[in-house]
Amino acid sequence: MLYTIPDYYHEFRCVAGKCEDTCCAGWQIVADEAALEKYKNETGVFAEHLKESINWEEGTFKQDKDKRCVFLNRSNLCDMYTALGEESLCRTCKLYPRHIEEFEDVREVTLSVSCPEVARILMNKKEPMHFLSYETDEEEEYGDFDPFLYSKLVDAREVLIDILQDREKKLNLRAALILEIARDVQECIDEEDIFSMDDVFDYYRTEEGIHEVETDFAEADHLTYIRKMFQNQYQMEHLRGDWESYLKKAEKLLYGNANDNLCEKHYMEMLGEFHTWLQKEMPEYEIQYEQLLVYFISTYFCGAVYDGEAFAKAQMAVVSILLIHELLMAQWKMNEKALSIKDVIEIVYRYSRELEHSDSNLNLIQELMSEREY
């Protein structure tokens, strides 16, 4: 079995009660069967509280009115961990913030930026991300797994990441390039001509291919597109009670009231001022966006081997960074034209929590992205 991890993987250490937020609130924690069986057989002094705190029908830990896990105390520490030790934790709690994507004989382990500490590490990382690999003696076969498609998707992902990390190019061009490549890769998948992907990779390395993307990007109606993508967030399940109100406040600052006509002049003036401020006060912002794009592409792109939706996954990555950028601009306005690294980290992990910790939200955004509207 081949395992891969990002190069910053071993930098992560849970800061527990010192964390600015908690991973034990806002979403339902599902316990695995082995853990549930162990909880049923617990006989110590903690047993009664333990058994009363589990929804046995659903296999989940109960929550209080604020959607906090019942084991989470006011110091943001886990009472189960304190009473029974680390081995008592279910698989979900042991793994988080580790995220695993599984393929035949391959396990790709990432760290989710929904964790504030992971977001802090990644948003402070200056060097291009790379990945480490190691092998074990484990073997596993998937009956309906397409190894040829997977191999070409891995090749495509390498090309996309190489482009994203080419800092000689402006980030908006890099993002546009990976979308165009992913669109053409999608055509190869749809037409069952996956070996033509190599021609796609070669074309977008040429001056002609790059110029085509630059032209298409310059002619696109970015404001209409990004506002539509922003409003798509209201269709999603909101895991935190204050997220929708935050989105509405941000939307009003960015685009005016929900029913207002778009004021392109006002928006473009604000955008220009914000970019000028970023370049002066936070010049590493393009590196931060690059790291997030690589994070989303490396985590999700090869999952297209299961559903064939490569373009949707690439578009989800780019749209996520566009939305994070819009939220940062709104926060900059809220802060009277100031922004800190703490603001960046908070928006990144909050956005990630809403998207990545809800299967319905991931499915919805992929469905919206698969409409090929870009």
Image: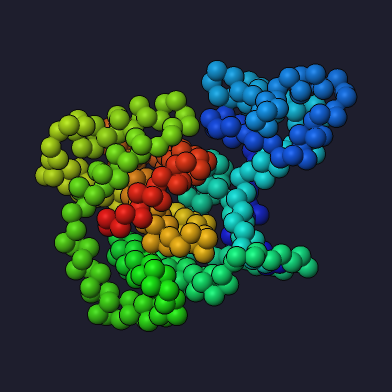
Residue at figure coordinates x 52%, y 64% from the top left: 305
Left or right: 316, with 250 as reference point: right
Q: Nearer the viewer, residue 305 or 64?
A: 305
Left or right: 249, with 114 as reference point: left
Q: Is residue 11 above or below residue 170?
A: above
x, y (%) of residue 80? 75, 28
Q: Is residue 317 above or below residue 328?
A: below
Q: Is residue 208 above or below residue 4?
A: below
Residue at figure coordinates x 17%, y 31% from the top left: 259
x, y (%) of residue 168? 35, 70
Q: Nearer the viewer, residue 195 or 241?
A: 195
**Which quadrant does the C terminus fall into?**
bottom left
Left or right: 306, with 54 as reference point: left
Judging from the image, the colouring scheme is: rainbow
Residue at figure coordinates x 27%, y 55% from the top left: 373
x, y (%) of residue 250? 30, 34
x, y (%) of residue 46? 81, 22
Q: Is residue 80 visible?
A: yes
Rendered image quadrant of residue 171: bottom left
Residue at figure coordinates x 78%, y 40% from the top left: 34
Q: Is residue 205 visible?
A: no
* Labels in figure, total: 0
**Which quadrant does the N terminus fall into?**
bottom right
Q: Nearer the viewer, residue 213 or 6?
A: 213
